[in-house]
Image (spheres, helix red, strand yellow):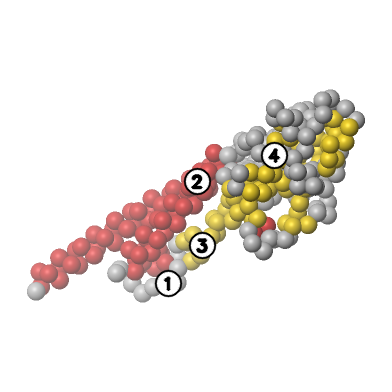
Amino acid sequence: MNHGIYIAASGMKSRMEALTVASNNVANAGTVGFKKDRVFFGIFNRVNGSNLEKALADSAVAETTRTDFSIGPLMRTGNPLNLALAEDGFFTVQTPQGIRYTRAGEFRLDSRRQVVTAQGFAVLGENDRPITLPPGPVEVGPQGDVQADGVVAGRLKIVHFEDLSLLRKNGQVLFEALPGAVQTPPERLTVKQGFLERSNVNPVAGMADALANMRSFEFLSRALHSLSNDVDKKAIDEAGRV
């Protein structure tokens, strides 16, 4: 197979993957607690052949996608059940698929007065049980202690992971700990009541990233078309000499 065609096709696939990631980032620029993804690229080794093939050989191809866990800006809401982590760590929640972790502190009370996420998943305390609040004004301390009308209901289970690469996204704001992930109490913990952590996506940079990948895809598409025509012409010429 023509090396240039293989490189162009692989590059188109990679750029499409990168465009999908960039588009998803931009679409979630307004999602509380969302963490953007980044595509990391490798480079093809140079191949012998035409100048176009050599140019394509320097084109990047996607190798892996990783989540950027940098902290997003905090937004004041005044809602006592809106919580943000000013430093590292994750809230712990119970889902039908098991324990998951999140930075999206857009919490509320369900019909049983249990603290739940916006999706309805129970937020867990340090005893690995849901936190149930009595009636009254809610107060959450900087270390995650929760009380209502002066009655202590528990302390939020907030964990730190030594290796964030062992967290896998489940949906947009939940993360699953993969085998081998080690969790510890955060060394630095500040829970801010009445705040939410916004997405760490910069919409302008995200749009520029999406546009760059779209242009690269179009370049590779034109290159693939040109190389395919060259292969067809060569095949016709060889057939004519038989």
Q: Position of residue 130 (x, y in %)?
A: 74, 40
In the displayed structure, would residue 238 be above or below residue 83?
below
Q: Is residue 75 visible?
A: no
Mark 1 crowd level (few <14, some 14–19, many ≥20, 10 Å Cα):
some
- Front label number (1 vs 2): 2
From the image, tell me which residue sits under label 3: 63
Q: Secondary structure at mark 4?
A: strand
- Kindly indicate whether the residue at mark 2 contacts the one at mark 1 (C-beta within 8 angstroms): no
Residue at the spot x=52%, y=48% of the render? 21
Q: Secondary structure at mark 3?
A: strand
Q: CA distance from mark 1 to mark 3?
A: 17 Å
Q: Position of residue 233 (x, y in %)?
A: 19, 63
From the image, tell me which residue sits under label 4: 122
In the displayed structure, would residue 170 be above or below residue 117?
below
From the image, tell me which residue sits under label 1: 46
Q: Position of residue 195 (x, y in %)?
A: 76, 34
First along the sequence among labels 1 and 3:
1
